[in-house]
Amino acid sequence: MQNMLGSEEASAPSEPEPPPEAVKPAAAAADAPEDAPDGRHSRVAPLAPSPAVSHVSLVELSLEEDGPAAGGDWTASAAPRVRGLDKLQELERELGAAQQELKLKDEEVAKLNRIRNEIEAEMEELTASLFQEAHKMVLAANEKQAAAEKALQEATMKIDVLQAEVAALKTLVITSTPSRPNAHLHPQIDLGKSNGIKIWKKGHHRSPSNQELTRPDASPPSSPARSPPQHLAAPEHIDEVDPRLLSEVSAWRESPSVELTAPFVRDVYREDIEPCLRFATPQLTEKVTSAVLQNSVCIEEVSSGLRGPNFPRRCALLNVHRTCRYRMKLPGETGWMDISQICRNRITAVCDFLNYLRYIERGMVKGSVIDIYREIMRLRRNMAVARLGFTT
């Protein structure tokens, strides 16, 4: 196109340049619609130049303006413009696609950030809950360990107590020698030689035939009518038993218990234990009875160093002045109470009976029902004797 313009300029005479006002109508005429060969006007809608291709559009417009002025073909001059429009549309499509892709990526990034924040919050919550659970587990383990150690200590103490009770039971059942031992529980003891007491025996006792010869100075035997009555010792071994009491002991032996809910223990408590532990003060009587039933009373002999000059003191249970060689301590009390010999005997008699029942309950006494019955009757007799003020 430039060659054509150059040839036209070379052939045409030089003319003065028109003023700017004349150029504007010419440009307007160039921009004005031209008549088509069929007499209709063909109009091409101007497009708003994009910022990205503004420079290219201006160059193409300037070339299009120069083309008709040079007398070139309109179709040939419009081809670059069409190509520019296609290129512009393609760029706009690419730009829209890039913007859409960028928007999707922004949404995906926002979604990932939200998921990350949620995961971090869940991790923090899970970590806190894990620490709390771990703290609870450690605390529970420490509590269980302390409880186990305490239970072990209590079990060890119970074992020691049971071993001591077993030793005491063996001493009581096997090696003890009371004033009137039971032949069934102590077969090793010769009743005829026990404590130097002569047991009355049936049979005819004959004196030696030479008694008068060996003792010429002996006085003649006194008449039975003039001699004072002699109380013969009652035999220790009595085979007669009370069938009612034996049945009660046998029924209790099936399921032994020291609680007062058992009929046999309740009857013994009403007939022997409660009268034996009845003292001057009702409140103190109740405390002593409760301590004895719970096996928590403590009685010890007062040592010579603690007796002091004024040894006769007031007995706390009888509420009279007596020679108090023993003292007692009840659970929940801080001080000791002085008690007399009779009170000590009454309390220990009840304790011996209840301890024997506890031994039976724990399965530490092996024997027949009749043997257990006789020992229980002996202990009940001791309670009655102690209640009356006699020594067993």
Image (cartoon, rainbow, N blue to C red):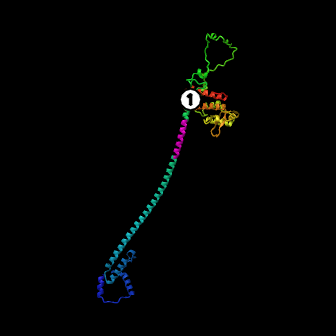
Quadrant position of residue 280 = top right
Secondary element at tag 1: helix
Residue located beneath label 1 in the image: 171
Q: In which quadrant is the N terminus drawn?
A: bottom left
| Front in this rendered view, residue 19 or 115 | 115
Image side of residue 83 versus residue 333, left or right: left
Would you say the magenta stretch is mainly helix, strand or loop?
helix
Q: Disc 1 marks which amino acid?
A: Thr
**Is 323 colored magenta in this rendering?**
no
**Tally of numbered discs:** 1
- Name above or below for residue 331 compared with residue 237: below
Quadrant position of residue 92 = bottom left
Name the residue at 34% across, 82% down.
66
Expressed as whole percent of the image width and height from the top left, the position of residue 261 reads: 61, 34
| Front in this rendered view, residue 269 or 43 | 269
Expressed as whole percent of the image width and height from the top left, the position of residue 133 reads: 50, 50
Expressed as whole percent of the image width and height from the top left, the position of residue 161 reads: 56, 35
- Name above or below for residue 221 compared with residue 264: above
Few, some or many C-alpha atoms within 10 Å of disc 1 (few <14, some 14-19, many ≥20)? Answer: few
Q: In which quadrant is the C terminus drawn?
A: top right
Q: Is residue 59 visible?
A: yes
Q: Is residue 314 visible?
A: no
Expressed as whole percent of the image width and height from the top left, the position of residue 352 reads: 60, 31
- Name above or below for residue 270 compared with residue 224: below
In this picture, which residue range is highlighted in magenta?
142-160
**Is 143 colored magenta in this rendering?**
yes
Name the residue at 33% across, 76% down.
80
Quadrant position of residue 86 = bottom left
Image side of residue 381 versus residue 365, left or right: right
